[in-house]
Image (cartoon, rainbow, N blue to C red):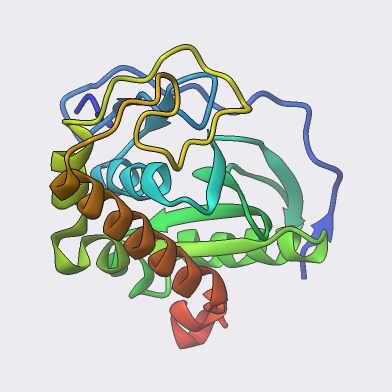
């Protein structure tokens, strides 16, 4: 469970992604003990923590990497760097995810303009890019329901990339009660449906009109 914190293309940077810093009194930062990565997934906001719950349960997600890669590009004659929040490997291939509060996309700001330029850079180089909104995550109280479900799931064992993480207990093969099993199967479908909707959506449609 989370421990509650016209661009000119340049080749991907060798710079290491920025390190998550210690909780400093503002925001929510921590780690999530995912079965889908050798290392715990890191988050810097409550929205990212909620997204990790959904990515962990979604059967279509095979691996998770947080702060996965730094991309460098030129915009307005300035060298910019962009680090996506999450990279996932899914049944339909890899995708980079940016997790945003809906309010953050409501204004015509320099941050949104830079995000647009970064989106263009990634897509020009063949990367799939999706924006996940807080409103996507909190619909139907999904994160709280997932957190309760995962709180009774057996703890993860040693990471093995060959594990079928869609199983309730992929390490030891134990079975839950019929009630929990039904909730687990329903939760996987719900999370997969959410991701399918997000990945079919054009991220440009979420940006303010002046930035499109």
- Compared across the picture, whether 66 is left or right of 45 comes to right
- Compared across the picture, whether 190 is left or right of 116 comes to left
* Residue at horizontal 53 percent and vertical 27 percent from the top: 37
* Residue at horizontal 80 percent and vertical 65 percent from the top: 124
Q: Is residue 78 above or below residue 63?
A: below
Quadrant occupied by the C terminus? bottom right
* Residue at horizontal 29 percent and vertical 56 percent from the top: 187
Instruction: Please identify the quarter of the rendering in which residue 188 is found.
Output: bottom left
Instruction: Please identify the quarter of the rendering in which residue 175 is found.
Output: top left
* Along the viewing direction, whichever of 72 and 158 lies nearer the viewer: 158
* Along the viewing direction, whichever of 193 and 73 lies nearer the viewer: 193
Give residue 77's position: percent from left, percent from top.
76, 57
Instruction: Please identify the quarter of the rendering in which residue 45 is found.
Output: top left
Give residue 12's position: percent from left, percent from top.
80, 40
* Number of numbered discs: 0
Give residue 60's position: percent from left, percent from top.
53, 54
Most extreme residue toward the bottom, as rendered?
209
Give residue 122's position: percent from left, percent from top.
72, 58
Most extreme residue toward the top, as rendered?
158
Q: Is residue 107 above or below residue 177?
A: below
Quadrant occupied by the N terminus? top left
* Along the viewing direction, whichever of 128 and 34 lies nearer the viewer: 34
- Compared across the picture, whether 8 is left or right of 150 comes to right
């Amino acid at each position: 469970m989370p421990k509650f914190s016209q661009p000119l293309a340049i080749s991907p940077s060798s710079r290491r992604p920025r390190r998550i810093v210690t909780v400093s009194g503002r925001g929510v930062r921590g780690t999530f003990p995912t079965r889908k990565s050798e290392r715990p997934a890191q988050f810097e906001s409550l929205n990212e923590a909620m997204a990790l719950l959904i990515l962990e349960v979604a059967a279509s997600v095979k691996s998770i990497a947080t702060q996965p890669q730094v991309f460098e590009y030129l915009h307005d004659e300035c060298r910019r760097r962009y680090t996506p929040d999450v990279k996932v490997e899914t049944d339909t291939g890899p995708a980079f995810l940016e997790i945003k509060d809906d309010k953050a996309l409501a204004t015509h700001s320099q941050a949104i303009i830079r995000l647009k330029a970064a989106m263009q850079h990634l897509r020009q180089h063949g990367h799939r890019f999706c924006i996940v909104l807080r409103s996507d995550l909190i619909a139907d109280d999904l994160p709280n329901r997932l957190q309760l479900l995962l709180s009774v799931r057996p703890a993860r064992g040693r990471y093995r990339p060959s594990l079928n993480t869609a199983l309730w207990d992929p390490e030891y093969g134990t079975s839950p009660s019929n009630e929990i099993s039904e909730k687990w199967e329903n939760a996987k479908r719900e999370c997969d449906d959410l991701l399918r909707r997000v990945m079919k959506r054009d991220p440009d449609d979420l940006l303010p009109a002046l930035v499109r």
